[in-house]
Image (spheres, helix red, strand yellow):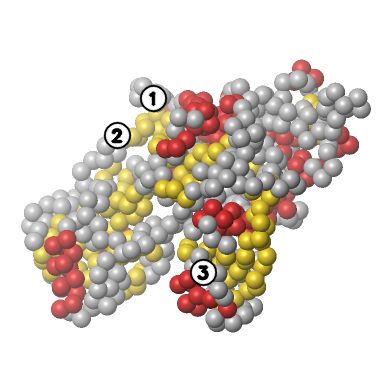
């Protein structure tokens, strides 16, 4: 490879995310300094996760973790970096051997560290590189790569519900947050990125929203090589920052294709039924590229209810990964269509077809789009002062909201039409409860999940504890201390709402007051709790904790 000297790269804050300003891609050469016990060595390292656009997705699912951490370390201006916990990226400005303080460890794995152990590396140089993606434009997670590489995995066998696979996660409530860094806002790369959304938004039930506080989002990443033609995306939602990588020479139509990947679509010609529609000419494929023509289940079998689509925007062209012709004036055919009228049509990048849209709509539970289940407002609780139900009307309609026969929505997932609730018109507290201001409270010492805690509160004509003001929290903590039950964690009636990108109280109101501990709320833990002594945290909703029920009174 030709060695290229980098211009100075800066570590700059965009307001949402740290982004590289260097315009050239590099492989950063490094040497391993071994596996070492972490201990308080971590005090000398900076955690670079969530602060850099090279560190995509979840570190434990990230491929090429060492290479990416090396690039971030170089851009930070440091020379020593480490990986811990199977991929988490750290770096240090210290050039001495502080990492050796606690001795060698045997707990590292695959060069990515381990629990309490870190693989340490030192940068030695840099060289120009071109990134290679699966099937030319797919950024795989570790889970996806493991399934694809294993011929005995569920991808190649029937009888497994792939829709629940951790390797392919759809966007919650059909909502995809997106983000364009300010320094890219006026570039053609960003314009193509945003234009790629339009057809999917028109033809599917997917909602695209500018990123607010959302934990997971899609962000345009401009390749640093000014001659790059790269267009690449992850499949479905991979978690946290998720790039669509775009070179300056990536065509506009390819961005429509990449957004299809981000929504969860794979390449059409990799379907397990493809041999009935196309023939792969294996001898015409470039050396080392035959694995780009595998066929496998697409993580969700129900999309096969849509007929194979030669015109799909997700289909390979006829000469992808092809050798040159004998006279070297063109390319051989690698994907030969069995229906000859499509011979020169496969691989189009102009429009989302009806079949493309149908697959996305099936995947997201709205197979009848543009007909969808619509909802009206919830009714009042059926009980004035006790456990009850609230209901809402559900009807089938297009966006004009004109009610039509429900048969037009028969293939779509129907939303809930009733929920448990409690009447808020009581005038006094039940026996065994304590009163503060205009609410009654009861402390429970039984350890239960967040869901069970809420159900038990509702059954007792109340709901999980909400803390709407600082004085209310102070009063509750004072009461717990007076009863000597303050050194415990208690569930709060708050949960993370993926589509809105924020925590909401169980009465569906936004948090105007909050008291999060530093580092909270954490990613992918969706239920809130009151930490002992002070502040709030988050935990997995299935963890068993104590809880407090709250009952508003008039």
Name the residue nearer the viewer: 421 or 141.
Answer: 141
Crowding at label 3, few (<14), some or many (≥20) Cα neighbours within 10 Å? few
Query: What mark, if any, has residue 399 been given in the picture?
Result: 1
Q: Residue at x 85, y 30 (%)?
A: 324
Residue 241 position, x and y percent, is 49, 48
Mark 1 and mark 3: span between their CA atoms? 59 Å
Residue placed at 58% from the left, 36% from the top? Answer: 246
Is residue 406 toward the left or the right of residue 442 in the image?
A: right
Among numbered discs 2 and 1, the one appearing first in the sequence: 2
Q: Rate crowding at label 1 as few (under 14), some (14 to 19) or many (20 or more) other CA atoms within 10 Å.
A: few
- Mark 3 = which residue? 94
Residue 368 visible somewhere in the drawing: no
349 in relation to 377, above or below: above
Nearer-the-camera pick, 504 or 92: 92
Find the distance from the CA under tag 3 to the CA under tag 2: 60 Å
Confirm whether residue 198 shows in the render.
yes
In the displayed structure, 12 sits above or below 368; it is: below
Marks 2 & 1, CB-CB < 8 Å contact: no
Q: Secondary structure at mark 3?
A: loop
Which quadrant of the rendered structure holds the C terminus? bottom left
Disc on the earlier residue, 1 or 3? 3
Where is residue 450 drawn, in percent x and y?
A: 35, 62
**Which label sits on residue 376?**
2
């Amino acid at each position: 490879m030709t060695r290229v000297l980098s211009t100075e790269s800066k570590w700059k804050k965009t307001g949402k995310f740290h982004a590289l300003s260097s315009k050239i891609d590099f492989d950063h050469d490094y040497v391993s300094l071994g596996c070492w016990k972490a201990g308080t060595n971590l005090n000398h390292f900076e955690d670079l996760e969530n602060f850099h656009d090279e560190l995509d997705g979840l570190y434990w699912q990230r491929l090429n973790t060492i290479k990416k951490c090396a690039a971030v370390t170089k851009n930070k201006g440091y020379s020593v970096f480490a990986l811990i916990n199977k991929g988490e990226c750290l770096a240090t400005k210290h050039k001495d051997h502080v990492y050796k303080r606690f001795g060698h460890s045997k707990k590292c794995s695959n060069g990515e560290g381990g629990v309490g152990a870190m693989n340490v590396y030192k940068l030695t140089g840099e060289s120009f590189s071109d990134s290679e993606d699966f099937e030319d434009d797919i950024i795989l997670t570790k889970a996806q790569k493991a399934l694809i590489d294993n011929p005995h995995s569920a991808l190649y066998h029937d009888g497994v519900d792939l829709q629940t696979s951790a390797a392919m996660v759809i966007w919650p409530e059909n909502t995809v947050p997106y983000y364009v860094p300010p320094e890219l806002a006026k570039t053609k790369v960003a314009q193509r990125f945003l234009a790629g959304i339009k057809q999917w938004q028109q033809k599917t039930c997917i909602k695209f929203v500018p990123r607010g506080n959302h934990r997971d989002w899609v962000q345009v990443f401009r390749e640093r090589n000014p001659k790059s033609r790269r267009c690449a995306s992850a499949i479905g939602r991979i978690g946290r920052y998720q790039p669509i990588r775009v070179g300056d020479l990536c065509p506009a139509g390819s961005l429509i294709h990449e957004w299809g990947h981000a929504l969860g679509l794979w390449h059409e010609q990799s379907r397990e039924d493809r041999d009935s529609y196309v023939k792969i000419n294996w001898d015409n494929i470039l050396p080392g590229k035959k694995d780009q023509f595998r066929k496998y289940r697409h993580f969700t079998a129900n999309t096969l209810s849509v007929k194979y689509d030669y015109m799909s925007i997700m289909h390979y062209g006829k000469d992808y990964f092809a050798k040159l012709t004998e006279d070297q004036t063109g390319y051989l055919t690698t994907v030969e269509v069995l229906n000859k009228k499509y011979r020169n049509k496969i691989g189009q990048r102009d429009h989302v077809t009806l079949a493309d849209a149908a697959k996305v709509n099936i995947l997201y539970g709205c197979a009848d789009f543009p007909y969808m289940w619509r909802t009206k407002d919830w009714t009042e609780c059926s009980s004035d002062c006790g456990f009850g139900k609230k209901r809402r009307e559900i009807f089938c309609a297009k966006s004009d909201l004109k009610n039509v026969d429900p048969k037009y929505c028969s293939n779509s997932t129907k939303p809930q039409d009733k929920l448990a609730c409690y009447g808020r018109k009581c005038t006094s507290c039940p026996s065994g409860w304590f009163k503060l201001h205009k609410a009654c409270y009861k402390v429970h010492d039984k350890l239960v999940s967040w869901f069970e805690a809420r159900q038990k509160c509702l059954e007792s004509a109340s709901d999980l504890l909400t803390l709407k003001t600082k004085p209310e929290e102070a009063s509750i903590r004072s009461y717990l201390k007076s009863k000597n039950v303050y050194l415990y964690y208690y569930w709060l009636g708050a949960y993370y709402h993926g589509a809105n990108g924020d925590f909401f109280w169980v009465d569906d109101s936004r948090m105007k007051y909050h008291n999060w501990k530093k580092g909270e709320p954490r990613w992918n833990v969706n239920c809130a709790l009151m930490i002992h002594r002070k502040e709030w945290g988050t935990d997995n909703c299935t963890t068993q904790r104590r809880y407090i029920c709250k009952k508003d009174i008039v």
